Structure formats: structure tokens, C-alpha cells
Image (cartoon, helix red, strand yellow):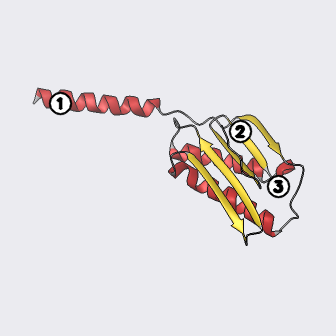
Amino acid sequence: MATVRASVFVFVALCICCLKLEGNLDASWISGWCDVAKFPPYSDNEYMAMKLIGILRDNTSMNHYNQYSDLIWYNEYHIYGRAACNGKISRGDCSACLQKATESLTSGDCMYSVGAQVKLKDCRMRYEPKYFEDE
């Protein structure tokens, strides 16, 4: 009986330690850029960029914290994107970080940009109308 209690205690202690090792979200700004070329507001291309950003935001935390996606609009417009999170944060923190990245990419100087990137401490997101390889 003492062996079972000791085993349960060790198991619980290890679980608690593992939970403590999971990092806290740090969504502080590192860098970013926005293409000076802009989509016309409410255009099909702007719609596709916003759709891609939403896909990256919503799916990255459930895809091993790393998501590449692309969309094609009637074989006329192709847009590529990537989002990634620090693997030491929780899924919820990954989603929260990517929400902050999304807000940066869809407002201010980046609004309607043909391409943009934001790097926060625990996540990053990028989209462009040309294929790219990211670090």
C-alpha cells in the first residue's frame, strides 16, 4: 500500500512539474513589416488575404504550432501564409498570441497590405502573394 501511495505521489509531482514547465504567453512585439502596395478595400484579393489570416489564426495551435497555407482565387490570385507558435506555450496561449498578430496585420499601416509579417515573442504570422520559405 505504501508503494502505491509513493508511486501516486511521484506521478502527481511529475505532472505538476510538467505543468510548471509550460511557458507563459509573451506577446511582446519583436518586429514586423507591411507591404506598401495595398489591395483595394473590399476587393476579392483583400477578402482572400483576410480568409488566409483567419485560417492561420484558427488552425495553427492544433497543427503542431506550425501552419503553412495557401489559397487560390479562380486561378487568378494565389496567396501564401505561415503562422507558428513557441512550442512551450499552451494551445490557448498560442491562439491568444495569434489573435494579437492578426490584430496587427489587419489594422493601422498593415490594413489592406498585399503582404505583411509580424513577429511577437511567442508567435509569428506572415502572408504574401508569392511563395516564401520562412525560418
Q: 2 or 54, which lies in front?
A: 54
Mark 1 against mark 3, which lies toward the viewer?
A: 3
Label 1 residue SS: helix
Label 2 residue SS: strand
Left or right: where does residue 7 sit relative to residue 67?
A: left
Q: 50 or 24, which lies in front?
A: 50
Above or below, 124 relative to 52: above
Extreme left residue here?
A: 1
**Residue at image mark 1:** 5
- Which kind of residue does numbered mark 3 sit on? Val
* Separation of marks 1 and 3 at Cα, in angstroms: 61 Å
Left or right: where does residue 13 sit relative to residue 50?
A: left
- Which kind of residue does numbered mark 2 sit on? Lys
Name the residue rendered at 55%, 34% in the picture. 24
* Mark nearer the N terminus (2 vs 3): 3
Mark 3 Cα shell of 10 Å, populated few (<14), some (14-19), many (≥20):
many
* Separation of marks 1 and 2 at Cα, in angstroms: 47 Å
* Mark nearer the N terminus (1 vs 3): 1
On residue 21, the disc is: none
List x then y, in percent, for residue 23: 52, 33
**Residue at image mark 2:** 119
List x then y, in percent, for residue 77: 77, 65
Residue 78 occupies which quadrant of the picture? bottom right
Label 3 residue SS: loop
**Residue at image mark 3:** 114
Mark 2 Cα shell of 10 Å, populated few (<14), some (14-19), many (≥20):
many
